[in-house]
């Protein structure tokens, strides 16, 4: 058994792609539009996983990926999507990543007060955990004093 992907339903495909690709930095690997089923599937990979995704195809399906599912006619309310849990990505500098995301208008639900973990929110209210690569960074303001926003 091996991990393949995590599927997330999204309400607005363009807003989701702006968040996951434009702001988080994931790359679109493939896309499938299904006219009969009236949905689009978009598969994304983290920059550091592109080679792994390519190599994984020798064993079958590509992995590890995030699958965004957009239902063309869907008006289903996915709510807070807390039933899902969260995605997690390792980052080189958690403070720089959170500062860049915050400047781009992304909600930081749990700031990186400890220099090692933060949670941000996608446009579809999915929680995305960011973890510092290696050891935690030294505590740093304004993050160390910043309160939580909402929940994750």
Image (cartoon, rainbow, N blue to C red):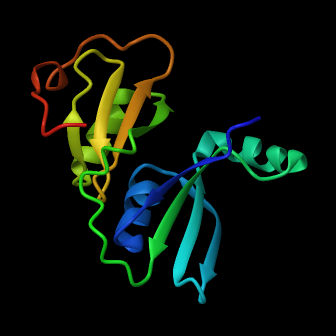
Q: Is residue 94 visible?
A: yes
Residue 10 sits above or below residue 53 on the image: below
- Residue 26 x, y percent position in the rendering: 53, 52
Residue farthest along the bottom direction in this orientation: 35
- For the C terminus, the quadrant is top left
As drawn, is 29 to the left or to the right of 46? right
Give the quarter of the image for residue 100. Answer: top left
Give the quarter of the image for residue 131. Answer: top left
- For the N terminus, the quadrant is top right
As drawn, is 92 to the left or to the right of 129? right
Q: Residue at x 59, y 89 (%)?
A: 35
Q: Residue at x 54, y 75 (%)?
A: 40
Residue farthest along the right direction in this orientation: 58
- Residue 29 x, y percent position in the rendering: 66, 61
Q: Residue at x 18, y 37 (%)?
A: 151
As drawn, is 25 to the left or to the right of 103? right
Give the quarter of the image for residue 36. Answer: bottom right
Residue 79 sits above or below residue 77 on the image: above
25 or 123, which lies in front?
A: 123
Q: Residue at x 30, y 10 (%)?
A: 138
Residue 142 sits above or below residue 54 on the image: above
């Amino acid at each position: 058994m091996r991990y393949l992907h995590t599927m997330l339903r999204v309400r607005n495909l363009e807003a989701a792609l702006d968040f996951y690709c434009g702001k988080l930095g994931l790359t679109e690997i493939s896309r499938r539009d299904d006219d009969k089923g009236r949905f689009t599937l978009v598969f994304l990979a983290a920059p550091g996983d592109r080679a792994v995704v390519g190599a994984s195809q020798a064993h079958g399906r590509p992995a590890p990926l995030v699958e965004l599912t957009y239902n063309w006619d869907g008006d289903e309310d996915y709510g807070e999507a807390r039933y899902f849990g969260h995605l997690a990505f390792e980052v080189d500098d958690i403070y720089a990543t959170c500062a860049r995301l915050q400047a781009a208008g992304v909600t930081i639900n749990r700031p990186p007060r400890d220099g090692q973990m933060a949670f941000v929110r996608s446009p579809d209210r999915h929680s995305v955990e960011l973890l510092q690569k290696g050891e935690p960074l030294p505590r740093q303001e304004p993050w160390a004093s910043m309160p939580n926003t909402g929940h994750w």
